Amino acid sequence: MREETLLTPEWVTQKATFLDWDSQPSLFKHYPHFCYRTPLSAHPSLQWLMETRCITSHQIVAHKPYYRLNVPSAGNLHPIEIYVQIRNIAGLLSGLYHLEVVTQELVLIAEIGVAGIEPYLGLEQRFTGCIVMLSIVPFRSSWKYGLRAWRYLYLDLGHQIGALSSSVRHFGLNLTKMFTQDTDALNRVMGMGEDERIVAVYGVGEGSMRLVKRLEDPLMSVQPTNYTIKERLLAENIKKVALYNDIPNSIVWDDFVTFNNTRRSARGFNPNVMGDKAIVELMEVKAPSSLEIVPILLQAHTMQLGSYRNKECTVSGNFNSDVVHLLLDQRFISGSNMVLLIYAVDFRAHSHIDAGIYAQEIYTMCAFLGVGCSGIGAFYDNESFRWSNKPLLYAVAIGGK
Ligand SMILES: Cc1cc2nc3c(=O)[nH]c(=O)nc-3n(C[C@H](O)[C@H](O)[C@H](O)COP(=O)(O)O)c2cc1C
């Protein structure tokens, strides 16, 4: 999908048309009002789930509600939903639930008992606790970005998996890997139509000795947006992607809840207030082996400006205007201290998810260090080879606040 999703100067000029925000598809999926609901705040043992995906800012913009979440999202379009199978948790009916982010409620789609989702994930015994399923809703993003949305869906998903992992670890729990041979069957039984696809699954709980039967009847189907326009190539490519189930090696943050609720993407920087020590700490954040991180230092107190590899400046120089241009001439980036360019060994969906997970950790590290940052998904692909021979997937601009 690299060629189909390239950004070139010609494409950008052509696309720079007026976007009618009134035609934006709805951001949050709603199951019918007759479904049983319970507020997450009534279940303290599920605080990790509440912190995984939540609203952290609510404004009115142009007479419409404008929500922002604990996770960043390209264009603030949030093309993700979360479902949870809950089994044997005190105070909750065992069942398959949708996490309704806007009300912070769990919405019961179907009760479970001897039958459950486990056999779709290769398990013969019941899984006690939660099975978390993350879906993507391509139209929420393709409505604005066309085919480029393919990349943003997986980057956004990576941010979401990163937040899930940090939250779980903060609350002293762990993620369990879940597999499936048949992603189609899992999607069918969960009631996913053509406009939504479950793409990652994790357990938070433990296996048991009790046998489980396969849930036979699909759950009710609810459209994830109020309307949709089919994008065939996008849908076909998403269907081919195997379930993601790598477990991020997230740092355990004591102040995770504060960072999670106050994090915002920077819209401007004050480069003088960011120290060199913070720059080095950010360079030390571990990335998975699927990625190659190239920090470009644009402004610092004593450190050498230029591009870095493994904390060593390998090419010195002032690359401010080159980097700003690479990132589609987004002017606010010129005030940043450092831009992390995130390249991948392979251009695949899973590398984009890895890049999103890594960037989510960078966001949290920036919150810890008291500096600002923003994920940058818009760049001229063919100009990125100057700093690596691999494909560029994502960038993060970082600087003083
Ligand atoms: C995959 C991805 C790509 C993004 N690309 C850009 C970008 O190119 N330029 C930009 O200014 N912000 C970018 N952002 C930041 C979003 O605009 C921001 O997350 C969104 O507006 C919500 O604001 P918040 O992060 O403060 O909650 C990106 C975020 C993500 C997750």
Image (spheres, rainbow, N blue to C red):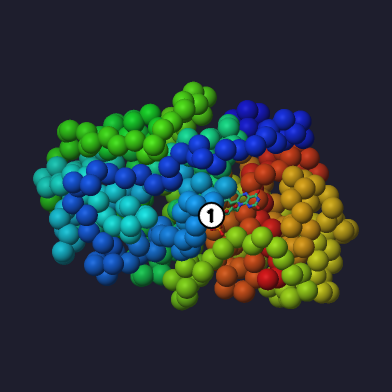
Quick check: is the Cβ at mark 1 less than 8 Å away from ligand 1? no
Residue 366, percent from left and from top: 61, 68
Residue 156, percent from left and from top: 52, 48
Q: Residue at x 77, y 48 (%)?
A: 329
Q: Residues within 10 Å of mark 1 (few under 14, many from 20)?
A: few
Q: Residue at x 51, y 46 (%)?
A: 77
The residue that mark 1 highlights is 61
Residue 322, percent from left and from top: 83, 49
In front of the other: 140 or 170? 140
Q: Residue at x 72, y 73 (%)?
A: 274
Quadrant (top left/top right/bottom left/bottom right) for the N terminus: top right
**Which residue is situated farthest in the right direction here?**
317
Amino acid on which disc 1 is placed: Val
Say if residue 70 shows up in the picture. no
Give the mark count.
1
**Which residue is situated farthest in the front direction here?**
63
Q: Secondary structure at mark 1?
A: strand
Picture quadrant of residue 215: top left
37 left or right, relative to 137: left
250 left or right, relative to 20: left
- From what the image shows, is residue 206 above or below residue 278? above
8 left or right, relative to 23: right
Say if residue 202 shows up in the picture. yes
Q: Residue at x 47, y 68 (%)?
A: 261
Residue 316, percent from left and from top: 87, 59
Quadrant (top left/top right/bottom left/bottom right) for the C terminus: bottom right
167 left or right, relative to 74: left
